[in-house]
């Protein structure tokens, strides 16, 4: 049955995205010389945190990740692997950044679709799609004691918002789900990868700030 | 119909409070040389964060601000204006601080009333009124990488708790809504403005701390 | 009626745990020279924060602590006492750390039981038990501007996870509630106290991190 195949594909994609996000999160813990538990927690919140914020805000509790043990074991496995093999993982940073862009594109699409599914209007749904993609990394940075990296010029949230925006607009136009999802995914991924390759940055304030 | 007028007035007041809070939040981003996205996020969480915490805790999900696009566009507009015109906005700091006191007084009242409306007892309702007023600024400071300013002697939370406390006590006494709201608003605003004018501070610990 | 005795005992234990956690939280505020309000807030979030996160995630809103004024007054009393008598309280640090272990053991058990009660599977229920025990302290550390202490080698989260894990396993085996709770409590408490006495630490990453 194609439906089952589609659902299974979605779960595999979702778990892959969580895995990649969790590796990036655990790497932050290792680089600050934090302990194994920190690697697991920072991995877990990076992978699952965005979805948790979205689910709590739309009232979809308990969040999906707390109802399916695979969603909990994947970040644990990612955190353990990263903690043990961190010199190797650390050298793969470029690869991780590219895979992370895939995770971001995936989460902004699934986040926006879930918010629409819970009856939210297009604008808040797009916003929650972006939050699904970027929320986990923001919690990770705050827990690790720093200002979120996406506040300092990294072009990361805008592609996520654009991808989620494409999803809500095309969904409103009544296009088939697969087209909606693919277009949102491609928008976010393309923009993010272009930003990486060309070194695009988000605008910083001009002129001196009157402190 | 007077009811419609009253409701419309409330929305206008609410949006004004969110606007002022969001300007103050975006200004924090600009002063730390964070990017445009940070200005929008810090503006947004300052304006809406307190209400989000309250709504999630009382189970009023999705929060009102996610069901009405005006509540999302106002902080975006505030963040953009602040980012672009920050030298001008920065010089208006005194004005912003005074307007911020109006926002605080408004939010502690509406927060306490909403909590009562959801069946909470007076004590937790007063607490949630305070949280509605101060929560957004606390998330902003944490995201910006600093200890919340209201932890360092700024007399800000106490007026909010007092205003919310007046609301729950007068509501319990059965007074008309308008009287309840006006008294709570005046209590918080008066105390906060007096604290600003006279330089009142919250008490700091006495004597050396045994670290 | 024995049931009433049991329930009353649980509430007393719960309030004691919250008191001890709140004292530890308020002490953090005093040692950073933060104001009275910070002592109350850091005391409150340390005592109640873990339960709040759990309740919001499982959809048990409003959290129990917002429906019972005793749960709000206990941390306020703890915060006030700590703020005023901090030189004395500060000298009792060793005692507080031991009492804190009792609070941790209690919260990981009650947290896991409540999650099971709301229909969660064993694995997420164990996780939420741990979160109930450690969540408040993590929020406290973030609000106080530092990386959570339990990320830097302190063996604190593992005993909580172990205690909660024992609870979900024994509950699945159908043992009586009192046995389940006692075994989980003893596991967490014993492990945590042994870690304190013997100076056990959580593993740190080996080798240099490629920053």
Image (cartoon, coloured by chain):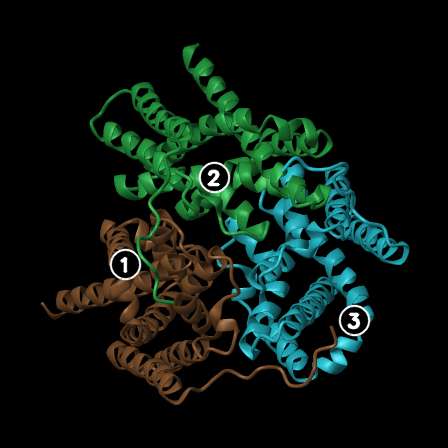
Chain colours: A brown, B cyan, C green
Q: Residue at x 43, y 43 (%)?
A: C54
Secondary element at image label 1: helix
Q: Do dots 1 and 2 share one subunit?
A: no
Instruction: Count residues near mark 1 (Cα–Cα under 10 Å), then give few for <14, some for 14-19, many for 20+.
Output: many
Numbered disc in front, either 1 or 2:
1
B193 left or right of B88 in image:
right
The kind of secondary structure element at disc 3 is helix
Look at mark 2 in the image and give the residue it sits on: C51
The alpha-carbon separation of the residues under discs 1 and 3 comes to 47 Å
- Name the front one of labels 3 and 2: 3
Estimate how packed mark 2 is, as few (under 14), some (14 to 19) or many (20 or more) residues with alpha carbons within 10 Å: many
Residue C60 visible (yes or no)? no
The chain that hosts pointer 3 is B
Q: Residue furthest front?
A: C207
Instruction: Name the residue tied to disc 3.
Output: B93
Q: Residue at x 47, y 41 (%)?
A: C50
In this view, which residue lies farthest toward the right?
Answer: B198
Circle 2 chain: C
Residue occupied by mark 1: A82
């Amino acid at each position: 049955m194609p439906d089952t195949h589609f659902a299974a594909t979605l779960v595999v994609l979702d778990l892959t995205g969580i895995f990649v996000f969790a590796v990036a999160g655990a790497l932050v813990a290792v680089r600050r010389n934090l302990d194994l538990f920190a690697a697991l927690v920072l991995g877990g919140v990076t992978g699952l945190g965005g979805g948790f914020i979205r689910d709590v805000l739309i009232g979809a509790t308990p969040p999906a990740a707390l109802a399916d043990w695979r969603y909990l074991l994947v970040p644990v496995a990612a955190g353990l692997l990263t903690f043990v093999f961190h010199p190797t993982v650390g050298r793969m940073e470029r690869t991780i950044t590219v895979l992370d862009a895939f995770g971001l594109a995936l989460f902004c699409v699934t986040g926006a679709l879930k918010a629409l599914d819970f009856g939210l209007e297009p604008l808040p749904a797009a916003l929650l799609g972006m939050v699904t993609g970027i929320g986990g990394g923001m919690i990770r940075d705050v827990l690790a004691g720093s200002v979120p990296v996406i506040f300092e010029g990294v072009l990361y949230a805008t592609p996520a918002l654009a991808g989620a925006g494409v999803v809500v607009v095309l969904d409103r136009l009544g296009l088939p789900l697969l087209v909606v999802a693919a277009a949102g995914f491609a928008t976010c991924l393309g923009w993010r990868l272009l930003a990486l390759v060309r070194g695009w940055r988000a605008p910083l304030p001009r002129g001196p700030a009157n402190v």
